[in-house]
Amino acid sequence: MLRDPGLIPLSHQHQHGLALAVLIDRGLKGDPPPEKAGELARKVAAMADAELLSHFRIEEETLFPAVRSFLEAEDVVDQLIEQHREMESLIESIARSSGPAQSALLKQFGELLSRHIRIEERQLFEEIQAKLPPAQMGKLGHQIEEQVQRVCPAGDVLPWENTR
């Protein structure tokens, strides 16, 4: 199903998150040099600061409250919020760690981020589009767009592109 225009700003950010998850997965394959985990940790920190944490806030303050009552499985929202908290904790742990422990945390973070985004895109967004009345979807989309422009003005620039 095509993505409703109201959800596209969040879907664009999901693409950034999936790109980061792939970068982590590829970066940790085989026998990476010791400095690779540090480089990836800096990219995670840049993504968190530039976009990811604000993305969580937009979903939790705007999207989830607006759609919860329309969902067949309301507990999916609770699951997604729990995953937000887990990712926030992992981001902090990654920043404080080094060596093999940092690599393990990065791997865990990348896998959770990928799984989380797929639930939102394939399950949550599809159900929202199927059940939310068009007028309400349009109003919600406008609120999402305003918040994304206010807290994540970088647009399509990947937050870690200048981080080495």
Image: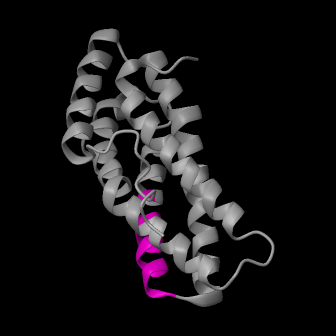
Q: Is residue 122 above or below residue 27?
A: above
Most extreme residue toward the top is 134
Image quadrant in which the N terminus is located: top right
Q: Is residue 150 above or below residue 128?
A: below
Q: Name the residue at 32% across, 36% down.
A: 63
Q: What range of the chain is rendered magenta?
A: 84-97
Question: Dividing the picture into quarters, in which one does residue 8 lie?
Answer: top left
Residue 25 % position (x, y): 68, 62
Q: Is residue 66 magenta?
A: no
Residue 116 seen in this snapshot: no
Residue 37 % position (x, y): 59, 78
The prevailing secondary structure element of the residues shown in magenta is helix
Q: Is residue 76 above or below residue 86?
A: above
Q: Is residue 87 magenta?
A: yes
Q: Name the residue at 23% across, 24% down.
A: 142
Q: How many marks?
A: 0
Residue 112 % position (x, y): 58, 59
Residue 29 % position (x, y): 76, 69
Q: How is the image coloured?
A: one colour
Closest to the observer, 70 or 11: 11
Q: Name the residue at 44% across, 17% down.
A: 131
Residue 8 seen in this snapshot: yes
Question: Dividing the picture into quarters, in which one does residue 141 lie?
Answer: top left
Most extreme residue toward the right is 30
Closest to the observer, 23 or 123: 23
Q: Name the residue at 28% across, 46% down.
A: 152
